[in-house]
Image (cartoon, rainbow, N blue to C red):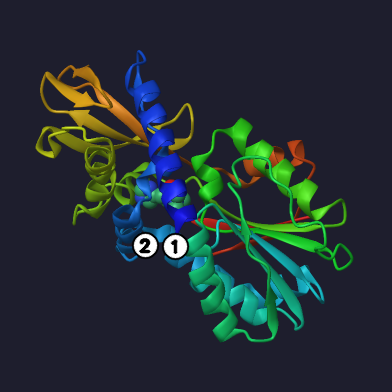
Amino acid sequence: MLERVDFRETQREALRADVLAGLTGARKTLPSRWLYDDRGSELFEEITQLPEYYPTRTETSILRTHAGDMARFCGARAVLIEYGAGAGVKTEILLGALESPALYVPVDIAGDFLVTAAERIEQRFPYIEIRPVVADFTDDFDLPADLPKLPPRVAFFPGSTIGNLAPRDAVDLLARMRGHVGADGKAIVGVDLRKDIATLVAAYDDAAGVTAAFNLNLLARINRELDADFDLGRFAHEARWSEAKSAIEMHLVSLADQTVFVGGRRISFAEGETIHTEDSRKYDLTGFARLAEKAGWRVAETWIDPGRLFAVLGLA
Ligand code: AVJ
């Protein structure tokens, strides 16, 4: 319990530092990881069900179709390390296809979430051993020293979360995975692909307004946790395509000249000024292969849907 209170307090301090740094620069920006408080995670779950949001259902169908191949790619007695504990449908598809015995190592920064996730997996797959690791996978961390090294380890990173990272950070994370699994290890990574801009923009600006609510919840969270006074009616969600970055950018646009009191500071917004809240990069297969090679990987397998919307890559 005490540990949880400490974690919340540390998180609040980190949020305050990020908000002040992000909103006092020449161009206002907030790190996308703060989108996922309880409400944000709930809204993201809703996003994955939207007709416009193709990535989750497409990746899930790729996993279902090719689970057998993926399990063979993992090999016998696999040690599956997941970056960001899913315990969702995608994880269960892969775990369900793995030959037993197997070892599942979910890595997540939220300890209580990790425990719930591990319990669910334990119930569904009693023959799979689980070794949860509490760590921020966007930073360097060590795996438990007694984790088996012998059956090649496999890093699992679904969801195209790799797309939220700047290419340099994506290479760092892929290199960290290489370090964790070793030279004979493997990785299975979900990557959202470039496609026509209308499809991309619609996926991040849905008709029902769920993505707008998801983005605006960041301001509600800052109001809640930092006693700020953002007026949510005076900011609007925007999703725009950046050709230069090959990314969908999410922004919150100020609808008026206004000032907001946040973290003990008064921050001015001009009408039309934005807070940049997320990048979601879209790769083509050769572009991602180049990125992976910089981190010491080669693309060994490409599992893709017939519409070529999304790819699950086997790296070796
Ligand atoms: C789960 C982080 C990959 O970038 O598509 C969905 C997050 N943001 N709609 C994505 C998100 C807006 C999502 N990721």
Q: Nearer the viewer, residue 18 or 180?
A: 18
Q: Quadrant of residue 44?
A: bottom left
Q: Is residue 121 visible?
A: yes
The answer to whether residue 209 is left or right of residue 19 is left
Q: Is residue 306 visible?
A: no
In the depicted structure, whether residue 228 falls above or below residue 103: above
Expressed as whole percent of the image width and height from the top left, the position of residue 23 reads 32, 22
Q: Secondary structure at mark 1?
A: helix
Q: Is mark 2 within 8 Å of ligand 1?
A: no
Furthest toward the front, the residue is 2
Residue matched to label 2: 48
On residue 247, which mark appears? none
Residue depicted at 41% across the width and 34% down the height: 13
The answer to whether residue 6 is left or right of residue 123 is left
In the depicted structure, whether residue 313 falls above or below residue 16: below
Whether pointer 1 and pointer 2 mark residues with C-beta atoms closer than 8 Å, the reply is: yes
In the depicted structure, whether residue 127 falls above or below residue 146: below
Q: Secondary structure at mark 2?
A: loop
Residue depicted at 35% across the width and 62% down the height: 45
Mark 1–mark 2 distance (CA, rounded to whole Å): 6 Å
